[in-house]
Amino acid sequence: MIVQRVVLNSRPGKNGNPVAENFRMEEVNLPDNVSEGQVLVRTLYLSVDPYMRCRMNEDTGTDYIIPWQLSQVVDGGGIGIIEESKHANLTKGDFVTSFYWPWQTKVILDGNICEKVDPQLADGHLSYFLGAIGMPGLTSLIGIQEKGHITAGSNQTMVVSGAAGACGSLAGQIGHLLGCSRVVGICGKQEKCLLLTSELGFDAAINYKKENVPEKLHELCPAGVDVYFDNVGGDISDTVISQMNQNSHIILCGQISQYNKDVPYPPPLPPAIEAIQKERNITRERFLVLNYKDKFEPGILQLSQWLKEGKLKIKETMINGLENMGAAFQSMMTGGNTGKQIVCISK
């Protein structure tokens, strides 16, 4: 069987910006026989995520993410439907997801890396399992629960950077749901700011490309910042940290402004900002959602319940076609997406 796949064509270099041309599409022959324990799946949706940027380097800089290899098929979060199964717990017609899904139209997978999903949990939207009812949703929820230290009724103010992205757009809503009295988002487009306040329940939003962030932050967070959900790092984060309160908390979700630079993760703070952090006893601990696997099941059930109750609004940017994986990745890395960036491979 001939299938199409996407391979890594070139590396952007540790300090380079990724482009669509770093990927290329090719045809490959899929074996006709499915072995014991395997499943043949048709790919429905694939995910592109900021963490993938480090997989484009020869060395990812972490011990839990392996680099993609040149001229080899690229992989990441995916969801599909089983067309043939030789795995005891999976049958034809099951919907399954995996964190290690090859970017190809059909694929033979080890059934043990596949997780069966119930479409009802995502209200019938299968792509949500790659977003709000999947890893980005769990990252936002568990990150806030474990590192945000929110106490309902205590008048806390939360700031979210990268607020219109996959995690940010959920984090602000979850902050409110868990008891923050005020949530302010930071993003880079006027229409995104409007979306945050008109649809996603943020109390205010700052356009960092058009507005004076320190002034606006001071105006919109008069009592200072208690919880900071950090998706970006860099100058924006330095500004937020400088306005954080004593004993406040940073949830280190990502540092996308630093991903095209050869710096350690999480990147060190400038000395003046580090001094503020220490002086005010602001927690800034590395957060890795994979360390909280025991909380995944209750987390998914909570996210699903909020979705069905209309308390969690989900935004996606959908692009069609395997041939557009590279373009989707490049767009996501430069803020072209609102909510989760998804590529639809087949319906």
Image: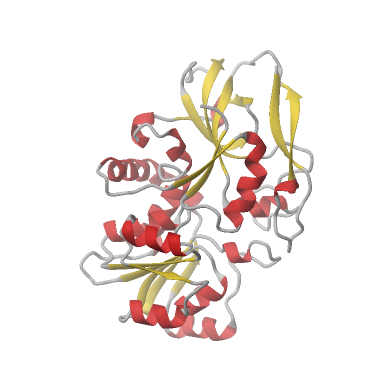
Q: Position of residue 31 (x, y in %)?
A: 71, 17
Q: Position of residue 242 (x, y in %)?
A: 46, 82
Q: In the picture, which quadrant includes the N terminus?
A: top right
Q: Residue drawn 67% across and 67% down?
A: 263
- Camera sees residue 302: yes
> Looking at the image, is 118 positioned above or below residue 224?
above
Q: Residue drawn 59% across and 66% down?
A: 257
Q: Position of residue 322 (x, y in %)?
A: 63, 35
Q: Position of residue 180 (x, y in %)?
A: 28, 65
Res. 128 image quadrant: top left
- Viewer-side residue, 325 vs 61: 325
In this rendering, would 77 be left or right of 200?
A: right
In this rendering, would 229 be left or right of 256?
A: left
Res. 267 image quadrant: bottom right
Q: Residue drawn 71% across and 65% down?
A: 262
Q: Residue drawn 70% across and 48% down?
A: 20
Res. 98 image quadrant: top right
> Looking at the image, is 169 positioned above or below residue 305?
below
Taking the view exactly as shown, the residue that stands out farthest to the left is 153
- Camera sees residue 63: no
In this rendering, would 324 be left or right of 7?
A: left
